[in-house]
Amino acid sequence: MSGNGFGCLAKNPLFCATIHCERSVTLANHKSALKRARQNEIRRMRNKSLRTRTKNVIKEVRAVSAEGSADAAREKLVRAQSVIDRAAKKGAIHKRTAARKIARLSRLVNKISA
């Protein structure tokens, strides 16, 4: 048997009739429930990726700020704002959470540039 190791011949497990994620196999039986399970799994992975990217850009801004480089911190802040806003727009994080993260990073960068 070839394929993805899940007993399905599709190269990507998201295109199988049943959804296989790192947790378990879906219990969906109806066509609409299978589709909903596929959509949820795709969204879960997309949200996970966006949240991870958000955390990484925040770490970058804090690391550059700790070094005391104001110009580099400002550049990283602009990039971080874009990534955080995009994650909020996609629904991976709440819009108020995004605003809070941006405000705290801006305050940090403004503190070292002053």
Image: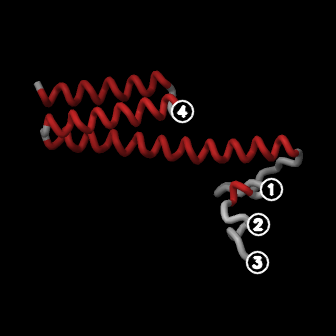
Residue, disc 1: 17
Q: As shown in the figure, which amino acid type bears the numbered disc 3?
A: Met
**Mark 3 vs 4, N-terminal side:** 3
- Mark 4: which amino acid? Lys
Quote the CA–CA distance across marks 1 and 2.
Answer: 8 Å
**Amino acid bearing label 1:** Ala
| Left or right: 24, with 80 as reference point | right
Mark 2 Cα within 10 Å, few/some/many (few <14, many 20+)? some
* Residue designated by label 2: 8
The residue wearing badge 3 is: 1
Can you say which quadrant of the picture contains the N terminus?
bottom right
Q: Are marks 1 and 2 in contact (CB under 8 Å)?
A: yes
Residue 3 quadrant = bottom right
**Rendered location of residue 8, percent (x, y):** 76, 66
Q: What is the secondary structure assignment of the residue under circle 3?
A: loop
* Quadrant (top left, top right, bottom left, bottom right) of the C terminus: top left
Classify mark 2: helix, strand or loop. Answer: loop
Q: Which residue is the site of mark 4?
A: 90
Note whether residue 24 is visible.
Answer: no
Instruction: Please give the name of the residue rendered at 86% of the width and 45% of the height, measured from the top-left corner.
Output: 31
Please say if 16 is above or below 88: below
